[in-house]
Image (cartoon, grey):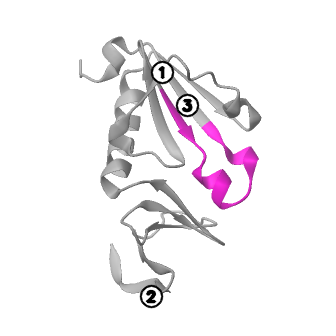
Amino acid sequence: MNADMPQGSDSEGWWFSAGDERVSMAYEFMIGPEGEFGIRAERWTPLHAGIDGWVESLALAHHAASWAKSITKIAGEAVDALDLEEYEPVPEVQGVTDNWWRGAETLIAVYRGEADCLTAPQCRTAHVYSGLADWGLRGG
């Protein structure tokens, strides 16, 4: 965290850097005026309602990738075609533009934040983790 150089103002709120990026990126990770975790380029886009949700999302992604029997990656318009009616949201990730869904033996991560922030709908992505008994929420 780098809280010594906040961005913003009293009227719009303050954003604090959430650390340095490891590669060149068109945006930076930040903590928003209400404690949300997100990205900021030309505009602010919250990804998770809080830092805890972002950490939960990272942990879930690591766990799902470790235990899934298959991972399907989807991009662009196909993300909007995903039928999530039989799935329930994972509340622990506190998703705003990025969210997780779970169903019988499947976890689905839907990432829309980067696409929204950069006005680039082709950047929408989803990862479908299949073959996870009991939602893949326990180790082996």
Q: Is residue 113 magenta?
A: yes
Quarter of the image where the C terminus is located: top left
Label 2 sits on a secondary structure element that is loop
> Is any part of residue 75 visible from this angle?
yes
Q: Which mark is residue 10?
A: 2
In front: mark 3 or mark 1? 1
User: Which residue type does callout 2 highlight?
Assistant: Asp
**Residue for point 67% across, 33% down:** 79
User: Which residue type does callout 1 highlight?
Assistant: Tyr
**Residue for point 51% across, 16% down:** 86
Label 1 sits on a secondary structure element that is loop
Q: Is residue 62 magenta?
A: no
Viewer-proximal residue among 89 and 111: 89
**Residue for point 46% across, 29% down:** 101
Percent of width and height locating residue 139: 24, 22
C-alpha span from label 1 to label 2: 40 Å
Residue 37 vertical placement versus 8 (above, below): above
Q: To which residue does mark 1 refer?
A: 87
